[in-house]
Amino acid sequence: MVDKIPILKMGKFLLLSIQVDMHDQLAMDLQEDLTHQIVLHRSKGVLIDISSLDIVDSFIGRMLSHIAHVSRILDAKIIVVGMQPAVAITLVELGLSLDGIATALNVEKGMRRLEQMVEDDLSLELESGEDRDFSAEAGD
Amino acid sequence: MSVPVIAELLKKHESELLQEWIASQRAAGIRTDLIDEGTVLNNSRELLKLLSIAALGGIDDLGSAEWKPVRNMIEALSRTQSRQGFSPSETATFVFSLKEPLFAKIQANCADPASEMLKASQLLDKLGLYSMESYMTGRESVIREQQESMLELSTPVVELWKGVLAIPLIGSLDSNRTQIVMEALLEKIVQTESEIAIIDITGVPTVDTMVAQHLLKTVTAAKLMGARCIISGIRPQIAATIVHLGVELGDVITKSSLADAFSVALKELDIRLVKGSLR
Amino acid sequence: MGKTEIFPLKQETDIVIVRQRVRKAAEAVRLGLVSQTKIVTAASEIARNALIYGGGGECVIEETTKDGRGAVRLVISDQGEGIANLDRAMVDGYTSGSGMGLGLGGAKRLVDQFAIESQPGQGTRIELWKWR
C-alpha cells in the first residue's frame, strides 16, 4: 500500500495528483503534509488533480474542504481538477457540493485558472469586497 | 419417504425417453434456423439427467434445493431463447413435449397410471410455467436494454463551438430519462473539455419536482467538474412551476432562449463575433 | 450469480478493501458506472461508521438479482453501542462524532433500498441494495 502522496513544487504553486484509493490516515497525512509545504514554500496556489479517483466519499470531501479552508488562511488559492462525472453525480447526491472550492476540467485549464486567480488577487489586493466564486469560470 | 415412481421411471428409461422426447420435439417442429439438433439433444439429455436426480427427493416442492439445478437450467435456456427470437410457445414446447413420452412410460409400467400421470402432468406444467416466467424476464430485460439505448439516442449532446456544448431536450422528461441524459452531458463535457454546457428545455412541456431537482443536481455536478451550465428556454408555465414547487435555483444562470444562452457562453469564453462587411 | 463474501471491518485499511470488493461485485452484476460509484461510496460511508462508531464489524457483499436485474446487496453490521434515535440519525447534518453528518442520510440517497436495524447496546445492522 502507498504510504504517502507526493506533493510537487512548481514555482509558486504546489501540485498533487491523487492516484490511489486513499485510506483515511493517508488522507489525514496528506492534509498535514500539504499545510506544511504551503508554509515552507510560501506557495501562492495549490492544484489537486483527482482525475484518477473513482470515488470521493464524505471523508475525502471533508479533507478537500479542510485543505481549502487552511489554504485560504495561509493565503494560497486552491483548485481541484479532473473530477469524474460519476464521482460528481455521487457527491451531489450525497449532499456535498464543496462550496468555495474552485474547480477545472483538467490540469492544464486548472493551472491557467490558478495563475489567473493569483494575478487577480494581486491586482485586487487593496480593494475590499466579497469573496468571489471562481469555480468553473471560463479559463481562456 | 419412498422414491417417487416418476423418479424411477426417469432413471430406468433415460435413454429411451430421450429418444422419444427428441422425436416429439421434432414432431412439434425444431427451429433449425435458430438452434441445431446437436444442441437440442445435449440440452434434452442434460435436463433429463437433472430431472431424474431432482425427482429422487420428491416432486412436490420445486422450490427446494434439490430442484435448483433443474430450475437454473430451464431459466438459462428460456432466457437465451427469448433473446434469440424464439416464440413463447416454441420455448414452452421444449418442456411440454416431454409429457407424451413420459405418459407412455407410465402407462406401460405402472399399476396405477392415472394418479401417476396426474402427478407427472402437474410437475411438467409447473416446469413449463417456470420456463415461461424466465422467458418473460428475459424478454423484459431485452426491452429494458432497448429502452435505455433509445434514451441515449433520443437526446444528442452537440458541440456549438469549441468549448460550448448544448443539449436540446424535447418531449416530456421523466426522472429516468433526465438522469440518463444528464449523465451523457457530463461525459461529453469531459470528452470535449467544454467549460460551458447549455441545457435547452424549450421543447419540454412540463417539469415536475424530481426533474427540476435532477437538472439542478446536474448543474452542481458540472460545477464540481469545472464546467458551468446555463439553462435556457424555460417556458412561463415551467418557471411558475419551479417557483411553486419551491425548487431553489441558486446561482444557476437561466436565459430565455438558446440564442441568448449561446451569446452568454461566447462572452464567457471571451469570443467576439464580427460581421465580415464591417471590415 | 449468487456469490457472497464476508469482509472484516477492523481497521481503516479494511474500508479500502471493502470499497474495492464492492466495486468488483458491482461490475460483475453489470451496474452502470454511476450506480457502481454510488454503491461504493455508500459502502464507504457505512463501513466507516461501523468502524468508528460501532467499534468494528463486518461487511457481507452479495452478487444477486432483484426482479431479474443484476443487483448488489450489502449488509454491514457492528456490535457497537447502536443508535438511540434512528430518525434523527437519518437527518443530514446530524452527527454524534466528528463527521459531517451526511453518512446515513447521504448513503440512503445513493442506493435503491436501505434498511437499518439498531437498538441501543445491540449494535447496528444496515442493508443496502443497488440494482440495474
Image (cartoon, coloured by chain):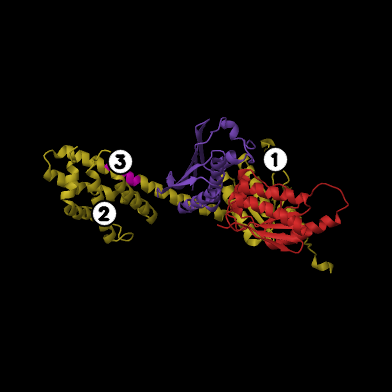
Q: Which residue is mark 1?
A: B248
Residue A74 painted magenta: no
Residue type, numbered disc 3? Ser
Q: Colour of chain C?
A: purple
Dot 2: what SS? helix
Could you say where residue B49 lies in the image, as x and y percent from the top left?
Answer: 23, 51
Q: Colour of chain A?
A: red
- Residue B129 visible in the picture: yes
- Chain at tag 3: B
Asked if residue B207 lies left or right of residue C73, the reply is right
- Residue B174 visible in the picture: no
What span is colored magenta in the figure?
A: B125-132
Badge 1 density bin: few <14, some 14–19, many ≥20, Cα 10 Å: few
Asked if C93 appears above or below B260 in the picture, the reply is: above
Residue type, numbered disc 2? Glu
Residue B130 painted magenta: yes
The chain that appears yellow in the image is: B
Discs 2/3, front: 3
Could you say where residue A87 lies in the image, as x and y percent from the top left?
Answer: 60, 51
Could you say where residue C34 lies in the image, as x and y percent from the top left?
Answer: 56, 51
Q: Which residue is mark 3?
A: B64
Asked if residue B82 lies left or right of residue B23, the reply is right
